[in-house]
Image: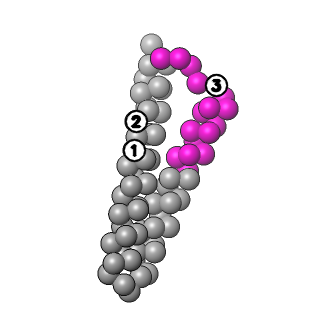
Amino acid sequence: MTQLTEMELFQLGEQLRSEALAITKNITYARESTDPKLQQMYTRIAERHRGHYEILMRNAQNFAQQRQF
């Protein structure tokens, strides 16, 4: 695996923060909504962002592990 530049690491961190914020916001919207369809939609969106976050985190962890060797 190639090494990431400082800028790429910074961007990865920014993307992780953005995904975490999107998760939090959509969970809040789901809780605050009184419409069941909107609750379901916001929950689905939060789960999609959680999936993105997990993929980014796995990639970051894999990179960190490979860098140790």
Q: Work out how far the residue at label 2 is from the one at label 1, CA to CA, in angstroms.
A: 6 Å
Q: Amino acid at mark 2?
A: Arg
- Left or right: 60, with 6 as reference point: left
First along the sequence among labels 2 and 3: 3
Q: Amino acid at mark 1?
A: Glu
Q: Which mark is residue 54?
A: 1
- Left or right: 40, with 7 as reference point: left
Give the magenta range. Answer: 1-17
Q: Quarter holding the C terminus?
A: top left
- Left or right: 42, with 17 as reference point: left
Tell me whether the residue at label 2 lies in contact with that at label 3, contact meaning CB atoms closer than 8 angstroms: no
> Residue 16 at x, y = what percent?
52, 46
Tell me whether the residue at label 2 lies in contact with that at label 1, contact meaning CB atoms closer than 8 angstroms: yes
Disc 2 marks which residue?
Answer: 58
Q: Residues within 10 Å of mark 3 (few under 14, many from 20)?
A: few
First along the sequence among labels 3 and 1: 3
> Residue 50 at x, y = what percent?
40, 53
Q: Quadrant of residue 11?
A: top right
> Residue 49 at x, y = what percent?
43, 54
Disc 3 marks which residue?
Answer: 5
